[in-house]
Amino acid sequence: MSQQWTDRSRVPPRLYLVTPPASDVAFAPLLADALDAGDVAAVLVRLPHGDDRVLIDHVKALAAPVQNKGVALLIDGHPDIVVPSGADGTQVTGVDSLTTTLARLKPTYIVGAGGLTSRDDAMRAGEAGVDYVMFGEPNPAGYRPAGAAIAERVAWWAELFVVPCVAYAENLDEITPLRAAHADFIAVGTAVFSDLRGPRAAVSDAIARVSVAETTA
């Protein structure tokens, strides 16, 4: 996840999956099937409510089908359980707890930053030493900026900063403008796991959309 592009305009992004807050291990085979579709860089696991022991067991149930394919398994929040669960890292929301999380987990584990509501927050996260920033994911109430605004934020970041950027696509049609904005990774969640064709077909479709390199001189 910490890879850096020397020329983002000529390197297609990679796919990054965001799971629903699945509450049982029955989701593991579904996730494994989705990953069989092709190249995925990372999976961000959104956890259900529960105590740490329950959440650790949940992550462990998903770890094998993800990590055995060479895919990074990240936890949405919950930095305290990264190590005991065997995850590869975490994504922190906002910048308030970044310093503590980075001190605890870096450099062994991946630490990303999401929930960045302003350019200033994004720059603070990048300066703090995160492995990536994410733009465009819905907040807990389901709100997210318009697709054009997200693409603009991604293009601004890609032009000025080296820290990789993950751009969240609400649907598969948003992948093309986010790729054109030179996101390093494109995240998809509901667009894959609610697709009537099934997650594997949806991931295959998403990979095809992210894999077209820009051809501009």
Image (spheres, rainbow, N blue to C red):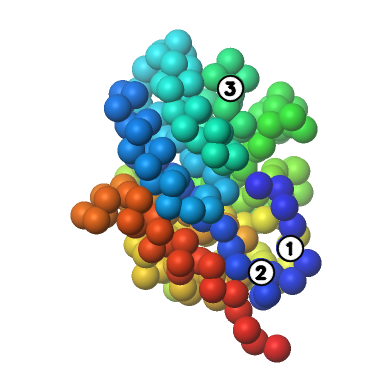
- How far apart marks 2 and 1 lie (CA) works out to 7 Å
Q: Which mark is residue 11?
A: 2
Picture quarter with the C terminus: bottom right
Q: Which mark is residue 66?
A: none
Q: Position of residue 56 (x, y in %)?
A: 48, 17
Check disc 3 and give the amino acid type.
Gly
Residue on which the image places disc 1: 5
- How far apart marks 3 and 2 lie (CA) works out to 31 Å
Q: Residue at x 46, y 69 (%)?
A: 209
Res. 97 visible in picture: no
Q: Position of 93 compared to 61: left or right? A: right
Q: Position of 89 compared to 192: left or right? A: right
Q: Residue at x 44, y 28 (%)?
A: 62
Answer whether labels 1 and 3 touch (C-beta < 8 Å): no
Characterize the local packing of mark 2: few (<14), some (14-19) or many (20 or more) Cα atoms within 10 angstroms. some
Q: Position of residue 72 (x, y in %)?
A: 58, 39
